[in-house]
Image (cartoon, coloured by chain):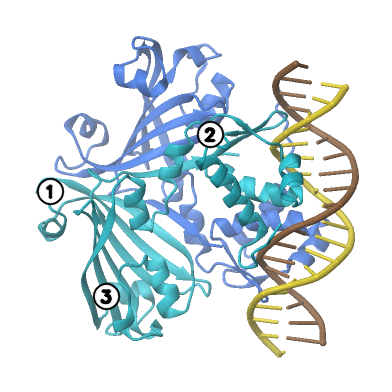
Chain colours: A cyan, B blue, C yellow, D brown
DNA sequence: CAGTGGTCTAGACCACCTA
DNA sequence: AGGTGGTCTAGACCACTGC
């Protein structure tokens, strides 16, 4: 089989299997070929097949039964719709069945507040790149996202930045660093007038408020995010699979 | 009934490493021994070591750098506190630094509402076991959890049930089935008078409302949960690590 | 009983980092 | 150049399931 060097074999196997599920080659609820059969068919070792299957299993897309076989989860469609990353908001909107679009409402260079400096391990007054973006689902505003990045991390001119990218990609592309992990606090909040101005809705409404801190491999905080999420329109849902 | 289940070697390795991190044998930020060294020291293959390390890495507790080494995340303490399962509420309270306790306020057998029947694939009027439990952090009510289980799934007398267990364990112990995966919707909500009665707090407050559906390996819905979560006291936070 | 997934091993080669 | 993590292989044994 032809191996494209950029992706690992396990990832390619993963994509093949996902494609077969999506296209109905493997029907929801049905049993898929055994590990050995897949190993033979695709010409890779059983260990590699297992790596791919483990990922699908962790997402809840397949159900593995020792001594029996591996089955496509009957709810695979529903689960695929919920498996979008918490931090790729466009993806999340799409998974909810809407067409996503982004309106960049602010991109400025400014000094860090005391609180931001603390969270980002900067001196108060150090400069930040501040992004405010409004995400729309079918033209209706649903998410307001505010991100800040230490200006010193930027490796490209600020003007080059494509504000429609997910924050993780912005970081990789314009700061030449990778985000290693993120910690997200989820809270509920009243829809304040300031937010209401962007999101619309009822003044008495409640919204989800996500506070995210992104960290790099060097353990340094790289960026912060404040996300206001209209959960009356968009569902925030998580899937947890147990082995 | 003796359920002596030997833990896998990878799990044991995992525990050894976690213990060393917790006890400071491996300090936060420091580099831990290489895979080969651990493999030699513990007398297991490198593949097994890698399985254990992969789990720690997925939780964000260690940071792996190709060509360099594996480092303990500087924020390992913070991350450990956030790594509790979303559905083990006692654990979550403990992770937030409080002493958890549980008050069972209701355990009854009743008919399913139309909505419950739909979600659980039952006929309206089929019987349910309904549990309502109040979780306290340092004696203060913080979470109200309401679970329903089809009565027909119970394999033990209702009176035997220990209502202090996490729902997943209740299920395994009294229904003799394992939960394979769960789908959780997270919403924000106003603190309604009915909930306020249990949780206390300000009448104008907002809370997190989690709706959970648990499914078994046979893909059948096994149980439902409605969780009201006082997020002004308890933090709901998630850690996401990227490879 | 045969077949399945679960686990573990030993060895190999690669890409990458630091020196 | 040497060591590290990343990947893959081939083979083995086990625990469990359904027939």
User: Relative to residue B216, is residue A101 drawn left or right?
Assistant: left
Residue named by callout 3: A130
Placement of B210 over or under B11, stated as above or below: above
Which image quarter is the N terminus of chain A in?
bottom right
Q: Earlier in the sequence, mark 2 or mark 1?
A: 2
Q: Quadrant of residue A100?
A: bottom left
User: Badges 3 and 2: C-beta atoms under 8 Å apart?
Assistant: no
Q: Is residue B235 visible?
A: no
Q: Nearer the viewer, residue B185 or B71?
A: B185
The residues bearing labels 3 and 2 have C-alpha atoms spaced at a distance of: 42 Å
- Of marks 3 and 2, which one's residue comes earlier in the chain? 2
Q: Nearer the viewer, residue A130 or A15?
A: A15
Q: Are marks 2 and 1 on the same chain?
A: yes
Q: Which residue is mark 1?
A: A201
Tell me, for residue A73, which label it has, or none.
2
Which residue does the image show at 27% across and 46% down from the upper left? A234
The structure residue drawn at horizontal position 75% and vertical position 47%, both measured from the top left corner, is A46
> Which chain letter goes with mark 3?
A
């Amino acid at each position: 089989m032809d191996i494209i060097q950029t992706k690992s074999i396990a990832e390619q196997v993963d994509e093949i299997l996902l494609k077969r599920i999506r296209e109905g080659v493997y029907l929801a609820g049905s049993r898929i070929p055994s590990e050995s059969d897949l190993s033979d068919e695709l010409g890779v070792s059983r260990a590699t097949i297992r790596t791919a299957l483990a990922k699908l299993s962790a997402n809840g897309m397949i159900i593995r039964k020792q001594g029996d076989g591996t089955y496509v989860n009957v709810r695979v469609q529903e689960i695929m719709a919920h498996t979008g990353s918490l931090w790729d908001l466009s993806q999340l909107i799409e998974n909810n069945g809407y067409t996503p679009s982004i309106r960049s409402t602010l991109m400025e260079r400014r000094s860090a507040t005391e609180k931001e400096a603390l969270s980002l391990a900067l001196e108060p007054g150090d400069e930040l790149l501040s992004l405010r973006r409004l995400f729309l689902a079918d033209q209706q505003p649903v998410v307001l996202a505010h991100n800040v990045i230490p200006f010193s991390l930027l490796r490209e001119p600020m003007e080059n930045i494509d504000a429609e990218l997910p924050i993780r990609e912005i970081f990789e592309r314009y700061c030449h660093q990778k985000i290693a992990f993120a910690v997200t606090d989820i809270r509920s909040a009243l829809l304040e007038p300031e937010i209401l101005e962007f999101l619309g809705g009822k003044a008495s409404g409640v919204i989800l408020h996500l506070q995210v801190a992104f960290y790099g491999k060097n353990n340094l905080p790289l960026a912060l995010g404040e996300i206001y999420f209209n959960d009356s329109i968009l569902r925030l849902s998580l899937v947890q699979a147990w082995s």
